[in-house]
Structure formats: C-alpha cells, structure tokens
Amino acid sequence: MSRQPLASRLQAHFLSHQTFWPAAMLLVWAGLNTLLLATTELMEYRRSGSDLPFWEPLSWETTSMVMILLCVWPLAWLIRFLASRFSLATQLLCHLAALVAFSVVHVTGMVALRKLWYALMGSHYHFGNLAYEFVYEFRKDAMTYLTMVVVIAGYQFIVRRLRGEASYVNESDDSSRPLPDRLLVKKLGKEFLIAVADIEWIEASGNYANLHLNGKVYPMRTTMAALEKQLPGSVFQRVHRSAIVNLHEVDHLEPTEFGDYTITLKSGDTVALSRRYRDDVKAAMSLA
C-alpha cells in the first residue's frame, strides 16, 4: 500500500485523469441541477393549484442541460485560445459574440429536443412568441454563459497551479538556443528543477507544449517547432505534428491498419507515429 498521503494521491489522480474528473464532476452537477430545477418547477405549479405531469418539467430542464453540456468543451477551448493570444479587451469582445452564438445554439437545440420529447409522449410543445421568448431565454443565457466562463477559467487556473509550469532557468534563454540540461518548474509558490533528459514525451496544447515525465505533466509556453529545433535530435524525435518522443523511453512500435504506428513508452503511455515521420524515427532507432 502506498505511503503517500491520501491528499497527495488524490491530487496525483486528479491531475493524471483530466478526461475523467471534469466529465464526472460536470455530469454529477448536471444531474443534480436538472433534478432540483425540475422538482422546483413541479412544486411551483402544484402550489398554484395546477396539475402537471413530472415528465414535462423534467423535459424542460433536461433538454436545456443537454445543450449546455454540449457547449462546455468548445467554450473551454475558446477560453484557452483567447487567453493565450489576445488582450483582455479583445477577449471580452469575442466573448460577447460567443454569447450570442451560445444563446442561439442553446435555444434552438433545446426547443428541437423538447418538440421531439413531447412528440414521443403523444403531446405537442409550443415555444410561444419567438421574439419575446428568445429575449427571455437570452437574459438567462447571459448569466449561464458568464457562470460557465468563470467556472471553466477558474478550473483551468487551478489545474495549471497544481501541475506547475515549466520555463527556462535563466530569463535570457530563448527559443533560438538549445535547451539547457534543466528547466525550472514553478508550482504552488515553489520552484524546482527537472532534467530535460527525463522528459518522456511532449504533446502540443495550443500555445503550450505539455512535458510528460514521471507520471506528471508540466506545460511550457513554447511551440513544438521551437522545441524540435532546441532538443537534441539524437534523443528526441518528432513523431507526429503534435508529439515529440524521447527515443530512450520507447518500449516498442506497433503498426496500425492504416499504415501508421503506435509507440508504446516504458511508462505505458502510447503516442501516435504518423507516416510522415515514420522513416526518420525508424532510422534514429536503427530500425530502418
């Protein structure tokens, strides 16, 4: 059994499963929120003396939530993209435009899903006066969009803080020079060094390159093209437009049915090897 404290193990699991954790938390929140709002609608109707089958408020809230969930990942990408390239003023203008698009997508999809749901129940859904109802929904969508931006940006900030960010040890270093033997990582107010030779593989992530080593991921503000020039070619090889691999960490290659390869590292991670880089990698590994 691991002697590592429970909090440290949870943090490590959280950072290494960034597909699972956001999806799980989002689905739990969505389920609870949908149930709460649907039962609230039902109670309000019954309080006024009206009778309403539960499937109706459930359909209203479920269809709205489905459309919101479909917008979460595109919005998360948009937040990262804008933050890495534009000033705050430009970001705000872009978010205003995105808000209108979000509301149109949300309302259109929500109404279409409700009409389908009602049809399956042998009933008919009437949205109401289009202009009035859109303004009504847009007011709510504006608050929803603002909340989503704050929560997603906050989540991304927390993940970056927990992971730490890699940079040059000396600020005078730049992408025109080879990488030094070690990089500086700033994490939760602390600083420590990592050896470049220990990097197992690197993946592109917007304006960042994620450095994978020892089960951890450290983002570094740079490009794959710059890193490819800086890293020693005898050790690090470009294997895909979005990946560079440390050849010392390769366990084996496995061909796919499409003519590409899958690289399995000693850590167990797998990385795609595209046909464009296949011969160079094989030559570097003396497999050609």
Image (cartoon, rainbow, N blue to C red):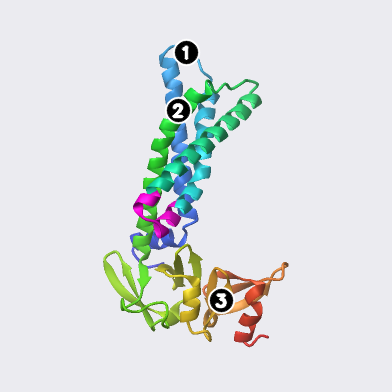
User: Residue pushed farthest top?
Assistant: 49
Answer whether residue 285 is visible to the viewer in this image: no
Inter-mark Cα distance, 1 to 2: 26 Å
The residue tagged 2 is 135
Question: Badge 3: how crowded within 10 Å, few (<14), some, or many (20+)?
Answer: many
- The secondary element bearing badge 1 is classed as loop
Q: Which image quarter is the C terminus in?
A: bottom right
Which mark identifies residue 238? 3
The three-letter code of the residue at mark 3 reads Arg
The reply to whether dot 3 and dot 1 touch (C-beta < 8 Å) is no
Mark earlier in primary sequence (3, 1): 1
Specify the amino acid type for callout 2: Val
Instruction: Please state if 244 lies on the left or on the right of 123 as rendered.
Output: left
Q: CA distance from mark 3 to mark 1?
A: 66 Å
Instruction: Write down the residue under mark 1.
Output: 50
Question: Which part of the image, by quadrant, shows the N terminus?
Answer: bottom left
Q: Tell me the chief SS of the magenta region.
A: helix
Q: Residue at x 47, y 76 (%)?
A: 227
- The stretch of residues the image draws in magenta is 79-91
Question: In terms of secondary structure, where does tag 2 sit?
Answer: helix
